[in-house]
Amino acid sequence: QVQLVESGGGLVQPGGSLRLSCAASGIVFSSYLMGWYRQAPGKWRELVAHITSASNTNYKDSVKGRFTISRDNAKNTVYLQMDSLKPEDTAVYYCYAGNAVDGMDYWGKGTLVTVSS
């Protein structure tokens, strides 16, 4: 059974930082592309960042220079370090795992990030 479990969300003031974690089980983690998506109220889910099995990264333009995605294959965990947070970063953040070889993908249940003073 595949599980992606996010943690680290919460309430933070503008300009603050949070680190999200996603612990994966039931997959060969090192072979999966891992990503973070977010969905704000009334909006579509959007890609925030992803990291390939080779640790190549890609970011949504509005988070470049503020967010950093990383992975620890020994711990089956992907992280999203979020700095200089803005109110518009408020959303539910979802962890994603995808494998282009077999076409399988999985989602976590999400963790809420609220940026507000």
Image: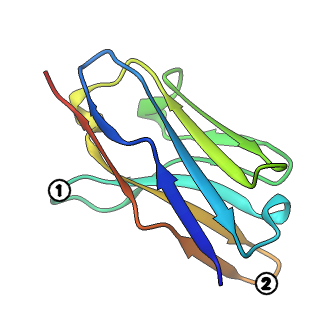
Q: In the displayed structure, would residue 65 be above or below residue 11?
A: above
Q: Which quarter shows the N terminus?
A: bottom right
| Residue 97 horizontal side relative to residue 113, left or right | right
Residue at 68 percent of width and 50 percent of height: 77
Q: In the displayed structure, would residue 44 be above or below residue 26?
A: above
Query: Could you tell which of marks 2 and 1 lies nearer the N-terminus?
Result: 1
Image quarter for residue 87? top left
Residue at 69 percent of width and 69 percent of height: 25
Q: Which mark is residue 102?
A: 2
Front residue of 73/101: it is: 73
Image quarter for residue 4? bottom right
Residue 78: x and y, percent? 65, 47
| Residue 110 horizontal side relative to residue 15, left or right | right
Q: Which mark is residue 111?
A: none
Which secondary structure lies at badge 2? loop
Q: Which quarter shows the C terminus?
A: top left
- Residue holding disc 1: 41
Front residue of 93/58: it is: 93
Q: CA distance from mark 2 to mark 1?
A: 32 Å
Residue 43: x and y, percent? 22, 58
Residue 58: x and y, percent? 64, 42
Q: Amino acid at mark 2?
A: Asp
